[in-house]
Every structure is written in structure tokens, then in C-alpha cells.
Image: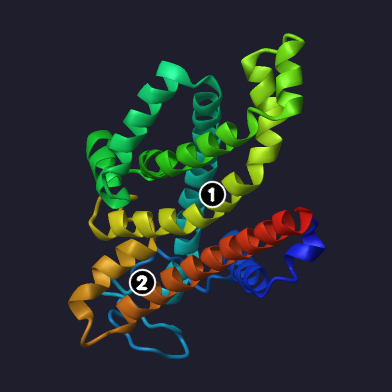
Amino acid sequence: MKVSKLWKSKSAFIGGFIVLIVGMTAILAPVISPYDPTALSADRLEPFGTRHFFGTDKYGRDVFSRIIWGSRVSLAIGLVASLGACVIGSAIGLMSGYAGGIVDIVIMRLIDIMLALPLIVLALVLVAFMGAGLMNVSIAVAISITPALVRVARAEALRYKGLDHVTAARAIGAGPGRIVVHHILPLALPPILILATLRVASTILIESSLSFLGLGVVRSVPTWGGMLSDGRSYLVTQPALTIVPGVAIMITVIGFNLLGDGLNDLLNRRLQDKR
């Protein structure tokens, strides 16, 4: 699918624009942040103003700077977890679907058990077992979203393993690994990437929820979920402490969802045109 066709979709264009802005904000955080996000000051709970655009929190830290730096954590965990889940889930799902038999049955029953738990519950259990921290949260979130990617990859493997070119490769002695990588993966990749894009939004929500509950990244690191948790005690007197990070989470999640929906629409349209 050409990039020029991608941006003809309104959903993909708007979602991509939002994701680009959030991504550039995260990359340029040291440049555009007016204050140190962890610096304490005597200007506690200051409202909207020219010196502190979104005011300050109970420790005198600039809310605007913390929002900017918080985008780094959310995007880092979202992208790393989604990429890891995409690689692991694709490998397990494709090999399970291609192998079939007892291997497929065992793997899918384990995946069904994982899917029986809500994403946030599974992530909570994993973080409680491994401990908090950026790496542990990324691993927990990646494991939580992997089952859905496994099922999609397996479905694609079942769909394509009976094609003529796959049968021909098997007939000339190609091994299962080579057949999956060279003949099935290229066909199965588009729906896997679409789901992985949509799952970035889920990972951001999970990370924010874990940080809100105090089980995410250490509290000294600015995160949107942690800011929500800190600001809930001042929802009446200083609503910006809760509203601003909430809006940041909402906009970012909408951006990734729109981008994923745009990719999905364009892919389905391309498949229909080929029929």
C-alpha cells in the first residue's frame, strides 16, 4: 500500500497528524519544555497563568512541562510493548496455525486462558509479580496484548497455508520456518500491523491505569497516569491537574485509533478492489 493512498483516508490523515505531533513533542521535550519537570518550587497549586501555562501541582512542579515529558513514557511503553507483542505474537500465531495438530491445540488453549482476563487485570498481575519500573511495565503490557495478536496471526496462517505457492515450497523441501517467514508472513503482515497500531492505544491506557494505581513507573518520573492520581485530591480547587493529563491521554488514544481505523479501511478497500 502506497503512502500517498494512505493519506487520502481522513481517519488515517487525522490520526497520523495527531500521532506525529505527540511524537515530535516527546522527541523535542528537552527543547520545548519551559521548566524541569521534576524541579520543586514554592509556587504550589498555582492556577493557569503566563508563568506556568497549566499551573503547578502540590509540589510546585510545572504541569505543562510534566505533560510534555510524560508523553515520552506513554509513547515509549506503547511503541515498545506493541512492537514486542507484534513480533512475539506473530511468531507464535503463524507457527501455531501452520503446524496445526496438538501444538496448535495447546497453544490456543493457553491463549484462551489469557484472553479470559481483561487486559488491565492481566497487566496488574504481571506487574505485581515482576515489580514496578519502565522495563517491567513494558514487558507486562506486551504480554497482555500478545494473545490478540497470536489469534490474528494464526487465522492468517490458516488462511494462506493451503495456497499453491506454499504447497509448492513444501513439495521442494522447504522447512516450516522458511515457509512461514518467506511465504506466509508477507501476506499476513498487513492485518497484524493494523492490530498492532490499534493496540498502541490500549497500551497507553494500560500504562496510565497502572501509573494511576501506583504500580507503573516510579513516581519521580512524570507520567500522565501519575499526574491523574496526584491531581484527584484537587479536582474541585485545581481541576487542571486532572483535566490536562486526561485530555492528553484522550487525544493520543484517539490519534492511534484513527490511524489504525484508516489503515484497516484502506486495506479492506484494496482487497475488495482485487476481487
Q: Secondary structure at mark 2?
A: loop
Query: Residue sitting at 47 percent across and 90 percent down?
Result: 50
Q: Is residue 23 visible?
A: no
Quadrant hosting residue 12:
bottom right
Query: Residue sitting at 58 percent across and 60 percent down?
Result: 260
Residue extending furthest toward the bottom? 49
Count of all numbered marks drawn on residues in the image: 2
Q: Please state which of residues 109 and 53 is positioned toward the viewer in this rendering.
A: 109
Disc 2 to disc 1, how far (Cα)?
Answer: 35 Å
The residue indicated by pointer 1 is: 196
Amino acid carrying label 2: it is Arg
Percent x, y of residue 101 = 45, 18
Percent x, y of residue 81 = 47, 44
Query: Residue sitting at 39 percent across and 38 percent down?
Result: 143
Q: Secondary structure at mark 1?
A: helix
Query: Residue sitting at 70 percent across and 36 percent down?
Result: 186
Q: Is residue 153 visible?
A: yes
The residue indicated by pointer 2 is: 61
Q: Please state which of residues 152 and 102 is positioned toward the viewer in this rendering.
A: 102
The residue carrying pointer 1 sits among few (fewer than 14), some (14 to 19) or many (20 or more) residues within 10 Å by Cα, namely: many
Q: Is residue 117 left or right of residue 266?
A: left
Dot 2 or dot 1: first in sequence order is: 2
